[in-house]
Image: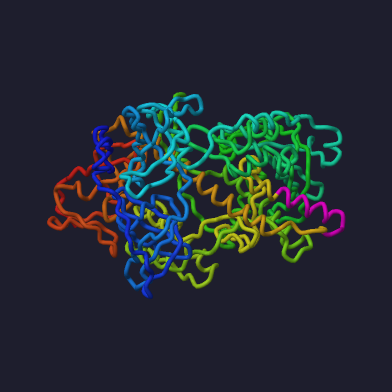
Amino acid sequence: MKKKNSKKKVLDKKNTRGRGPVRFSSKGRQSKSQEELKGVVSLTRDGLGFVVAEGQEDDIFVKPSHLRGALNGDTVKVVASKKKTGARREGEVVRIVERSAKPHIGVLVVRGRQVWAIVESARMPYDIRIPLENGEELPTIGGIKAQNGTKVAVLVTDWPRKSLEPIGKIVDVLGKPGENNTEMHAILAEYGLPYRFEPEVEEAANKISDKITEADIARRKDYRKVTTFTIDPADAKDFDDALSFLKLDNGNYEVGVHIADVTHYVRPGDTVDKEAYNRATSVYLVDRTIPMLPENLSNKLCSLRPHEDKLCFSAIFEMTAEAVVKEVWFGRTVINSDERFDYEQVQAMIEGGDGPLKDEIMTLHGLAQILRKNRFAKGAINFERPEMKVEIDEAGRPVNVYQKISKESNFLIEEFMLLANRNVAEFVAKKAGYKDPTFVYRIHEAPNADKLGSLRSFAGNFGYKLGPTESTKQTAKSLNALLGQVKGSAAANAIEMLALRAMARACYSTDNVGHYGLAFPFYTHFTSPIRRYPDMMVHRLLTKYLEAFYSGRKLDQMPDKGTYQVWCEYTSAREQVAADAERASTKYKLTEFMQDKIGQEFDGTISGLTDWGMYVEIEPSKVEGMVSLKAISEDYFTFDEEKYRTVGKHTGRVFTLGDKVRVRVLRASLEQKQIDYELIWDDKSGK
């Protein structure tokens, strides 16, 4: 664990974190056994560097003395040794191309005119000096004055060669450390995510009229008299999708997937649109939602609240009782939702309870089950990992931790959203009348062959077999079979995680390669424009194609594919940043949950093994923490990677995945979002 400087140590200019001045190498000349690459630096708490270079599978190790002042997240040029079989590549930074735009979070130490930010991150082994020049005072931002002990966000601006520490400037003042708002704002600031709308954005959103005119209705199909409802989490405020149901005279069903018509209200290039693009996605922290759109849109105009007329962009399906789609229509509608259900209410009906619209719910449930069965039969991957949820009180304090498991009510909505997304993409790609139309696809490439090999070996350690993976369909079948075998076993968590890591990351692209995980040759995101900017892009493109299609003409000019690809790459990156911030908030709250449990003992299960420690999930909360191998005084333990086990040198004691252990909570560091356990030795002789 990274030790924080005492205030006295910060002021000792002869020693920053116990290190001397950063030494810059004078080398940098490239030999025939080296190559120059561009990449991003990842630092450890010990100051060791690893450069993830463009187009390279393996990272490049860089000694602290060869970093040239590069810090975590910086883009650099590095001269690296050429790849040798089995050897880790080493390199040296020759130039910092661009400093990271991601701020560092720390607590201010002020000594007269001398100011430092004591950085919390384990990936930042140096503190940052904040120079005050010409009578300059510490800033006030967001109504909070920066002063000694205040938590701030700091951007590194320079690291002069003769300076013992990097130089930075305060870009946000977050508040008093430990307070819930301060810590959540710190996570958002660390990931470069906004936590408030600028006044001009709010003003522009508030000026958008909520009036639905007769002209608006005349241009749409009127579904206000068709049975319609929403199903969302109990605490949801924005309802961006609804289902309608109608039994037809021919015995088939008409199922409507109605999506909030955000692009009716938000026009390309206006103030709200620019802000939505910059954000690209809503962010869901443990205790709050950071919306992509201001409240007047996300929770009012575009939210499909019950008993209110609402404008939608819809996909209407005629389906048989066997869930075969006979016809599909896309276009703009007006609806009036009859009911606002939460998942628990619908699940209760599915499990035999009563409720409004039960017949409609049960028919749709049956159709969804068929769609789901067919999807897996065609090769969709069946990942069903429970999600850790933290229950908080009104002050934001965690009071309970539990695992959220998806049930049939979740699947009901999921399958119809997938149906709409798939059919929209297929219409544009195959039926709109263009050979290579510009469109925004949600793509997911096939798994990496080397990672599948690692998964095969790993599963074999526990007696499980991954079947043939020569073709994509074979791979899907084999992965599903493996996941089915391990379900409920001690190794399930680790094998599922490794299987996930073998998969490529889904992203947005104008070049369609299909969605491997869902087994769809065409797929997009059409169903959540309140919270995802790519869905707004899809709505606008689909509008163009539909207008041309229904009028019997072709587009005069195809939308520029290059521009849309840039937007796809940007929104994909922002999606990942949001996911990282969401995980960080969960880790923080889990750590906070364990703070009053220091010294308490729990039964646990080994959930992961590494060179440095054993990860243990305790009962009943499933909160994971680490037992450091160095801290086990009863024996010297080493990790056997080949057999995936940890072995004691003297006692022969063996630990492997799924073993039951007893642990004591040693520490819960909010700064590092890290929980440490210590093993309670039970004097077993070993295996």
* Residue 583 % position (x, y): 45, 43
154 and 682: which is toward the camera: 154
Residue 134's place in the image compared with 485, above or below, is: above
**Residue at the farthest front position:** 134
Which residue is at a point 36% across and 42% down the rendered structure image?
121
135 and 32: which is toward the camera: 135
330 and 386: which is toward the camera: 330
Residue 483 visible here:
no
**Residue at the farthest bottom position:** 32
Residue 417 visible here:
yes
User: In this image, 437 relative to 681: left or right?
Assistant: right
* Residue 36 % position (x, y): 43, 67
Quadrant for residue 308, please give it: top right
162 and 22: which is toward the camera: 162
Find out whether residue 419 is within the magenta segment.
no
Quadrant for residue 338, please give it: top right
* Residue 145 % position (x, y): 44, 25
Quadrant for residue 348, please give it: top right
Majority secondary structure of the magenta segment? helix
User: In this image, 531 relative to 164: left or right?
Assistant: right
Quarter that holds the N terminus: top left
- Which portion, as a residue range, is magenta? 539-554
* Residue 143 % position (x, y): 50, 24
Which residue is at a point 33% across and 44% down the rendered structure image?
165
Residue 79's place in the image compared with 584, above or below, is: below
Quarter that holds the C terminus: bottom left
